Amino acid sequence: MMNVAIMGYGTIGSGVAEILEKNKDTIAKTVGQEVALKYVLDLREFPGSPIEDKLIHDFSVVEQDQDVQIVVETMGGLNPAYPFVKACLLAGKHVATSNKALVAAHGTELLEIAREKEVNFFFEASVGGGIPIIRPLYRCLMGEQIEEITGVLNGTTNFILTKMDKDGWSFDAALKEAQHLGYAERNPEADVEGHDTCRKIAILTAMATGKEVNYEDIYTEGITQITDVDFLYADKIGMSIKLVGASRIAADGMVSAYVVPLMITKEHPLYMVSDVFNGILVKGNMLGTSMYYGSGAGKLPTASAVVADIIDAAKHVSRNVKMGWTAQKQEIAPMGANQFRYFIRVAGAPEERIAELMAFGPREVITLAKLDEFAIISRPMLEAEFKEEAAKIDGILKVIRTEL
Ligand code: HSE
């Protein structure tokens, strides 16, 4: 029998306990032996809950129990998740986590310890919730050079943007509903300011390059500046706005990566990725583009990915599965070197101002009734050039990058 301890009985941790119980026969059949939940570590009490008799408050019980082979970390945040996970790996236990902040900040060290100790540090649930994306990168796509990853990677912001776009909801009402449904991070800023997406694209980029990616090197903009008027314009030209995390890996190894709200057309494969769903496009040099789609957040979808990691650890209980990245640093190109077209809202009337905007080689002029403003979509421009030209123009009300 394999014994599991869950650290953190919140939304995801309780989902893991539920799946281990509900699917225990299937799991036992896959692993070849029973996988049992032995402890749940949490500061809180859960009277009347099914795990009441497994609840402990002292981490050293998990760390010191030789019969616990696999530990699940679903606490979130870095403290105490980081010291606890590190101690578990050093104690020779496998760890499965859903915590992208932990993986993005300390993944290099934790992967290294796991290799030394011949155990596994798995984090399928840290990106894309229940969507398989980490394992496809190191298993199914292992013969590919990955050239591009582009994803809608945050369920909360996608839920908010979809509600604003399709149902006219306010930003605040949509955020509240996402929190109520258990999609949001503990601190909603992590979702709406793009930090969660930034950590996820950092993890995916590190998986693709095999090198450490510092998430602080990734240019990140969230969705707090996106308004109903932006969606009115987007709607008029058959586009939508998605929070996208992307990385581009050139043949010479140069990497660009960023997180931005992006205006995309109906033809873009991410256009139909709505509500809490995530979608991730991966372009390999042989396969071309493949897409991974599904529930990007929420209790059972995310817990399902954690359970898959538990099973993988149980099936490789005495060896480290080669995956992840090394301590070699991956350089990220400056944002100014990336190319976009730009949706630009300008105060005034087009006939009075269009001459000033020629540097943007506008491809399209868009007007909305009853507004003393208009919008253009620029020619493809390097971000550095765009910034230089935009600084010369008064009355720019909003800029949103658009696909090329
Ligand atoms: N807050 C995250 C999201 C949870 O909304 O996508 C899943 O990582």
Image (spheres, helix red, strand yellow):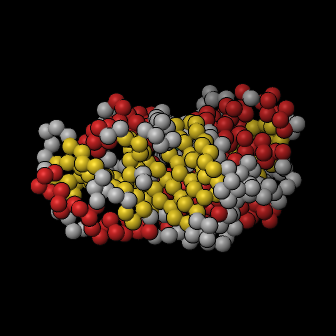
Q: Residue drawn 62% across and 67% down?
A: 251
Residue 130: where, in percent of width, then height? 62, 39
Residue 15: where, in percent of width, then height? 63, 35
Res 142 → quadrant: bottom right
Q: Quadrant of the C terminus?
A: bottom left
Front in this rendered view, residue 371 or 51? 371
Front in this rendered view, residue 248 or 66? 248
Q: Residue drawn 56% across and 36% down?
A: 295
Front in this rendered view, residue 285 or 345? 285
Residue 352: where, in percent of width, then height? 11, 55
Q: Residue furthest left?
A: 352
Query: Looking at the image, can residue 188 be seen?
Result: no
Residue 68: where, in percent of width, then height? 80, 47
Q: Residue drawn 39% across and 65% down?
A: 382
Res 207 → quadrant: bottom right
Picture layout, residue 265 above or below residue 398 = above
Q: Quadrant of the N terminus?
A: top right
Query: Looking at the image, can residue 305 be seen?
Result: yes
Front in this rendered view, residue 258 or 102? 258
In-image side of 89 versus 393 (left or right): right
Q: Residue drawn 40% across and 36% down?
A: 162
